[in-house]
Image (cartoon, grey):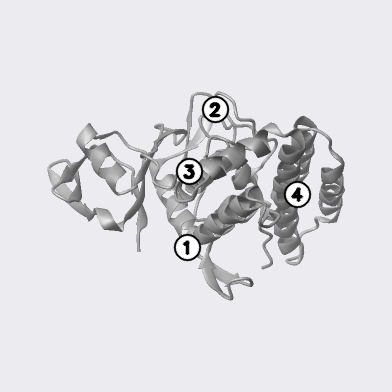
Amino acid sequence: MRRALYLMGGGTLSRKQNTLCLEREGAKRYVPVEQVLEIHVFGEVEFNKRLLEFLSQHEIMVHIYSYHGWYMGTFYPREHNNSGYLLLQQVVHYLDAEKRLDLARRFVFGAIQNLLHVLRYYQRRGKALEDILTALEGQLGRVHSQQGIEQLMQVEGQAREAYYRAFDRILEDPDFEFEERTRRPPRNRMNALLSFGNSLLYTAVLSEIYRTHLDPRIGFLHATNFRRFALNLDVAEVFKPILVDRTVLSLVQKRQIQARHFDEALGGLYLKEEGRRRFLEAWEERLGTTLHHRGLKRHVSYRTLIRLELYKLEKHLLGDREYRPFRTRW
């Protein structure tokens, strides 16, 4: 089974015959290329063109993060699944205002449904969240009446604003008070965790898009402009509550991540290396968690569910079946 390779420290990554080799402080670690799904570079890792050619041959993406864990960019190998017809349909659905708005509504509707599901999970465990659930249900009811992308994003933003208020009631931990959403820089520990998790989800969805016929540059909720990728941001909205937010809440509740795992820098708070390692371990476990798929009648992992979501989107663009965003039922 192919796995993500996370490079936290420094060193040199190179090709040694038909194997990947990581050299660090005189020690060499060999990794069979057939076992690597994608590479995430957090440390000061050097590599050369020969390695990138090798990775491209094996369809392996390389995601680069800054010292503080910010997503910086991706080496996106030559595409192997091009489809001119699907690309045209993706463009048609973007340029047609009604078609684009329809898809954008579906992403926001799916996202809010999953926000509600996460909060109901905690409500069943005794947390007083009734007023926040009511606020979210109100925002869900407004989705289909919005007549523009900007208004739709406002609804999504207001839903998330209400949703984040629940975090303090769920955790009851003064070290991880939410206060308000801040991104660049994240001004408290909870925001640092959410930003790090969202970056990981964006790259996970991007990696799965690469394995379909979709073009990651054309999104529907997020505008296609000078930003390199947009479609992964759209699809990530549906999965954030069940993948990122649940991972964050679980890590804090189980005290697997504590205040000592953060550093203050550049006016914000960031995970230290040990904190990132703990998060990545939980993240991989979450992506690999399986659940029963009613349609396929078998268990599939969350990573596979992301791929299936993209196939559903392909069918919508081709006119085969209307896209219905994934709705968790645990």
- Closer to the observer: label 1 or label 2? 2
The amino acid sitting under disc 1 is Gly
Q: Could you tell which of marks 2 and 4 lies nearer the N-terminus?
A: 4
**Residue 39: x, y in percent?**
35, 45
Number of the label disc, if any, that sits on residue 227: 2
Separation of residues labelled 4 and 1 (CA atoms)? 25 Å
The amino acid sitting under disc 4 is Phe
**Residue for point 62% across, 54% down:** 315
Separation of residues labelled 1 and 3 (CA atoms)? 16 Å
**Residue for point 24% across, 43% down:** 54
**Residue 283: x, y in percent?**
48, 54
Separation of residues labelled 1 and 2 (CA atoms)? 30 Å
* Residue 142 visible to an observer of this rendering: yes
The amino acid sitting under disc 3 is Thr
Question: Front-most of 265 and 3?
Answer: 3
Number of the label disc, if any, that sits on residue 298: none
Establish if 48 lies above or below 111. Answer: above
Question: Front-most of 195 and 137?
Answer: 137
User: Circle 4 sits in a helix, a strand or a loop, which is it?
Assistant: helix
Q: Could you tell which of marks 3 and 4 lies nearer the N-terminus?
A: 4
- How many residues crowd mark 2 within 10 Å: few (<14), some (14–19), many (20+)? few
Separation of residues labelled 2 and 4 (CA atoms)? 24 Å
Q: Which residue is mark 1?
A: 288
| Number of on-image labels | 4
Establish if 243 lies above or below 216. Answer: below
Q: Are marks 1 and 3 in contact (CB under 8 Å)?
A: no
Which residue is farthest bottom? Answer: 297
**Residue for point 19% across, 52% down:** 30
User: Circle 2 sits in a helix, a strand or a loop, which is it?
Assistant: loop
- How many residues crowd mark 3 within 10 Å: few (<14), some (14–19), many (20+)? many
Q: Which residue is mark 3?
A: 203
Q: Could you tell which of marks 4 and 1 lies nearer the N-terminus?
A: 4
